[in-house]
Image (cartoon, rainbow, N blue to C red):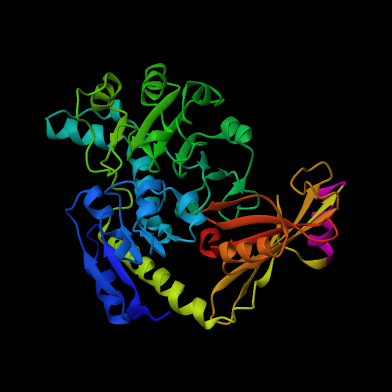
Amino acid sequence: MKSNTIKILHIDSNHPLLWNQLEATGFQNEADYSSSKEEIEAKIQNYNGIVIRSRFKIDKNFLDKATNLQFIARVGAGLESIDCDYAQSKGIHLIAAPEGNRNAVAEHALGMILSLFNNLNKANTEVKSGKWNREANRGHELDGKTVGIIGYGNMGKAFAKKLRGFDVQVLCYDILPNVADANAKQVTLEELQQKSDVLSLHTPWTTVTDKMINTAFINSFAKPFWLVNTARGKSVVTSDVVDALKTKKILGAGLDVLEYEKLSFENLFEEEKPKAFEYLLQAENVLLSPHIAGWTFESHEKLAQTIVDKIKGIYFEENEKNEDIRVTGIGGIFFKTNNPKEVKEWYQKHLGFNTDEYGATFWWKDKNGNDCSTQWSPFAEETDYFEPSKKEFMQNFRVHDLEGLLKKISEEGVTIVGDMQTYEYGKFAWIMDIEGNKIELWEPIDSAFK
């Protein structure tokens, strides 16, 4: 398909390079920044692509009217404003750009921690009002602390990278295995809660993370801790955080996002302010910012460039590939063992594997010079990750177009196990071969592991 046949509707304004580069490539751009959702729905069948930030939700009704839609590009990190499952069932490509603002988010989170530790906001206000309170503003040092990160994708990894200049222990927890790198050790949630002095959230808003930070969660921490949230506001129950601030279970909070935000992220309240929010406004150990962690001049440009590159990738890079190629490489080799620790130590000693808690990651480059990874992982004998296979191993294969491949092999009668899952690290699906071996298929986003 030629790019000049592709009509793109821009529903939100973005950095001009996005429009200009798409136009120069041959795409047909049209803008509508003011029409209502209903007005957009009335004409969306005329377009092949949408570029949006967060003006409204793209739901089932919208998608049913978008009969010619081939992609949705959200200029941001997450896709929670889109009915992803329904869009994917229609073969629509979903594009986000977490790579574009991960550095900005990481710097903002670090800035919040340092400001909280050193009472910078409180001290600044006091000095400007004529008060000179040195002892009351004695601070803490980050050196020697343990920082826990929940969500170790683009944002979490970027934040951990910023912490390399400090003498801290960095722990991460994620729902996916084997995401650790040289900057953080992956642990269970329980271990993270036992050891952390600082908790930083870098998760999308999902059914799993909704209202995740509540009283029970907070009380599971062994020590009082500082909380930083630059992810999604609805993952935190504000009233429970306020209660913990009052009891000093939470020593201070840096909140760039709030549960009261509307989907557009442009405003907070249409009614009276909640009491919990009133407390945050008065608390000296609370920093608030208006959802701007990823909102820098630099990220504005990076986000746009990332979206351009991914749109072009759909229509050019894919078309350059042989349509018969389904698997592009080995993503991982997983096997069961009675003693994963000893096995990893053996491979480290005798074969030089750079092992961690989850195995070893091998980095290589494809023909275009892109960084690619392959994972080697011993699993405990009792793991259920290989089920329903009864075999002692599982293979992971890298694929270019997972949705397209699943459609093809389903028509060919291949058994598909469960549903495709989408994460910041890529898309995953599982199938069974003719001998009962479970195979994991992975459409990777290798940059998420950097």
Residue 59 visible somewhere in the drawing? no
Q: Position of residue 195 (x, y in %)?
A: 58, 33
Residue for point 77% across, 66% down: 352
Q: Nearer the viewer, residue 22 or 246?
A: 22
Residue 46 in the magenta stretch? The answer is no
Residue most extreme to the right: 338
Q: Position of residue 414 (x, y in %)?
A: 73, 60
Q: Nearer the viewer, residue 118 or 397?
A: 397
Residue for point 20% across, 36% down: 124
Q: Nearer the viewer, residue 410 or 239?
A: 410
Q: Position of residue 283 (x, y in %)?
A: 28, 25
Q: Image check: 28 left or right of 427? A: left
Q: Image check: 63 left or right of 145? A: left
State whether residue 398 is above or below residue 36: below
Query: In which quadrant of the rendered image does the N terminus lie?
Result: bottom left
Classify residue 291 by image quadrant: top left
Classify residue 138 by image quadrant: top left
Residue 67 visible somewhere in the drawing? yes
Q: Image check: 14 left or right of 326? A: left
Numbered marks: total: 0
State whether residue 283 is above or below residue 143: above
Q: Position of residue 97 (x, y in %)?
A: 40, 60
Residue for point 65% across, 52% down: 178
State whether residue 226 is above or below residue 352: above
Q: Which SS type dominates the magenta stretch?
A: helix
Q: Which residues are magenta?
A: 338-350
